[in-house]
Amino acid sequence: MTSSTTTFRPAPVGYGFHPTDEELVNHFLKLKMTGDYDHVVNTIAEVNVCNYEPWELPGLSAIQSNDPECYFFSRRNYKYSKSQRANRTTGAGYWKGTGRDRTITAKSTGEQIATKKTLVFYNGRVPNGVKTNWIMHEYNPTFSFPNKRDFILYKLKKNPDDLPAFDEGESSASNMDEEDSQLRAQLESFSGIDEGDYNLNSALHFSN
């Protein structure tokens, strides 16, 4: 169980790393897939996330800070050598998809660049797994180019203990009251950041 060689470093006081979905995919993930720009995107560590339990992953983040989210590049992991079925099992449990996949588009062109899947971690094994508050977004790129490396990107967070983790089939707004809708928006955005308020230059920012 090894990750790529990364120098973990504490973040300066006031430091925050909050890229939008589009920036995560169209900048960080795309450059990682080309194989020539690892030094540019080493703010995000390369880790096989299913080799670790979710509570171990924050310690493997390339940036050690008080931010509630952390990010990882990971190569695709399949259940079987000739299968396209993702393997999301860890030693202590498994990641389970919840809700509908979302489409990530480039604002400048309207082109679809990725799908975003929400995963919830369960302790134990199917069908007796116990849901936890560990949530992860999985970004799967839909663009393709020659000689690309096969990476996906993960955004991880543990929700506070008093916030429930949503299960499958609970993503329809018609089945939720206003309070539930607000809570869903908080979980999906993690930090509550409006992506329209950020551009690539603001992904790394410092407080005054």
Image: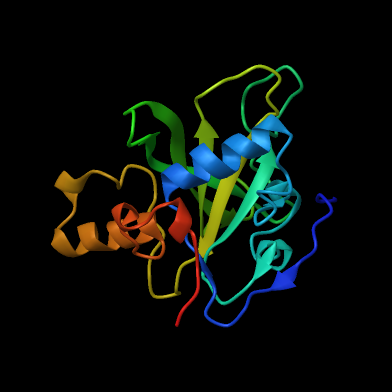
Which image quadrant is residue 163 in?
bottom left
The answer to which of 191 and 56 lies nearer the viewer is 191
Residue sitting at x 28%, y 63%: 183
Q: Position of residue 192 (x, y in %)?
A: 34, 64
Which image quadrant is residue 104 in?
top left
The answer to which of 145 and 48 lies nearer the viewer is 145
On the question of residue 127 being in view, the answer is no
Q: Position of residue 100 (x, y in %)?
A: 36, 37
Q: Position of residue 26 (x, y in %)?
A: 50, 38
**In this view, 143 is above or below 203:** above
Q: Position of residue 178 (x, y in %)?
A: 14, 60
Residue sitting at x 54%, y 53%: 155
**In this view, 45 is above or below 97:** below
Residue sitting at x 18%, y 53%: 176
Residue sitting at x 46%, y 40%: 117
Quadrant containing the C terminus is bottom left
Left or right, 167 with reference to 141: left
Left or right, 9 with reference to 171: right
On the question of residue 92 being in view, the answer is yes
